[in-house]
Amino acid sequence: MPLPHIPGYNRLTKTHKYSAAGIAAAGAAAIAFAVVPGGDAGAKTTAQDLPNKPVALTSQKADAQEHREVLTKQSALAAKQAKEEAAKKAAAKKAAAEAAAKKAAEEAAAKKAAEAKAAKERAAKQAASRSATRIETVADTTKKTYPDNLDGWIRESLDIMKEKGIPGSYEGIHRNIIRESGGNPRAINLWDINARNGVPSKGLLQVIAPTFQAYHVEGTSWDPYDPVANITAACNYAAARYGSMDNVNGPY
């Protein structure tokens, strides 16, 4: 017998369809019993007398099974999502650790390179310093020495003057030193016209500051009281004005 048409039947689940089919079958059976002729004419058979309990029990079991399947699927999906999330976190943590390790390695390498460069520069400076020291030592051993007195000062000045092309003799320099300062390298004139003008004469050959600065000879001290610097600058001035210190026989 075809099943009766039920609105929305095609949208029902399989379990619900089975339940509906059972109910429809039970209804059909009830109708059949009601129209069968003969038998006990006084007996009345209705749909309530049919055994419909097994159909309801089957529907409940099917619903329970479907519910368990849904729960199982949901649990499996949740577990899968949790596993994927844990995997993502582990991967991110690993990537961060690798990045930190790489950065630390790069910083260590940069520090090591900087230290190596600094060490190389120090070694180069030390080598240059040792080389300069050796050169200076050699130069010192070959450099001419002079006694620290009037004789030594004049002789050293004469050697510098010879190198620079400045004329003058030992006798001419010595004579003018004795007249000007008596051989005192710290002598200073505080009473003449130069002193009154604020530029007193200083040193062995009594040179005023403007003259000393104008005729200073390279390689000597800039201290006007330095004996060699004073003699050399004075002789350079005398050569320019008088031809030589030898030609000076009085104040100049």
Image: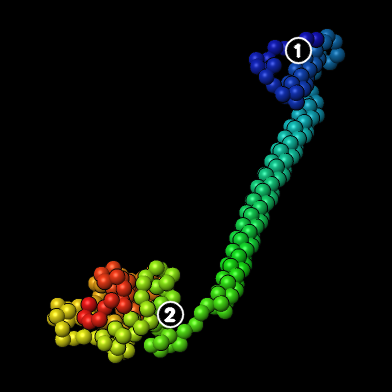
Q: Locate residue 115: give its quadrant.
A: bottom right
Give the x, y percent position of residue 181: 27, 88
The residue lying at 71 percent from left, 45 percent from top is 87
Q: Can residue 45 be seen? A: no
What element does badge 1 sit on?
Answer: loop
- The outermost residue toward the right is 39
Q: Is residue 165 left or right of residue 195?
A: right
Residue at point 41%, 87% (across, down): 151
**Residue 121 appears left or right of 228:** right
Residue 18 x %, y %: 77, 22
Three-letter residue code for mark 2? Glu
Label whose residue precedes the other's in the sequence (1 or 2)? 1
Is 160 located above or below residue 29 in the figure?
below
Q: Secondary structure at mark 2?
A: helix
Q: In this rendering, would 83 be left or right of 197?
A: right
Quadrant location of the N terminus in the rendered image: top right
The correct choice, above or below, for 116 with respect to 64 in the image is: below
In front here: 151 or 101? 151
Q: Which residue is mark 2?
A: 156
Name the mark on residue 62.
none
- Count neighbours of disc 1 (C-alpha within 10 A) and say few if under 14, some if 14 to 19, many if 20 or more: few
Query: Which numbered circle lies on residue 3?
Result: 1
Q: Is residue 73 above or below residue 83?
A: above
Q: Is residue 14 above or below residue 88?
A: above
Instruction: Indicate the quadrant containing the C terminus: top left, top right, bottom left or bottom right.
Output: bottom left
> Residue 173's spot in the image, x, y percent?
34, 81
Residue appearing at x 56%, y 77% in the figure: 142
Q: Based on the displayed image, in which of its 4 quarters is residue 223 positioned?
A: bottom left
Marks 1 and 2, how far apart in space?
141 Å
Q: Amino acid at mark 1?
A: Leu
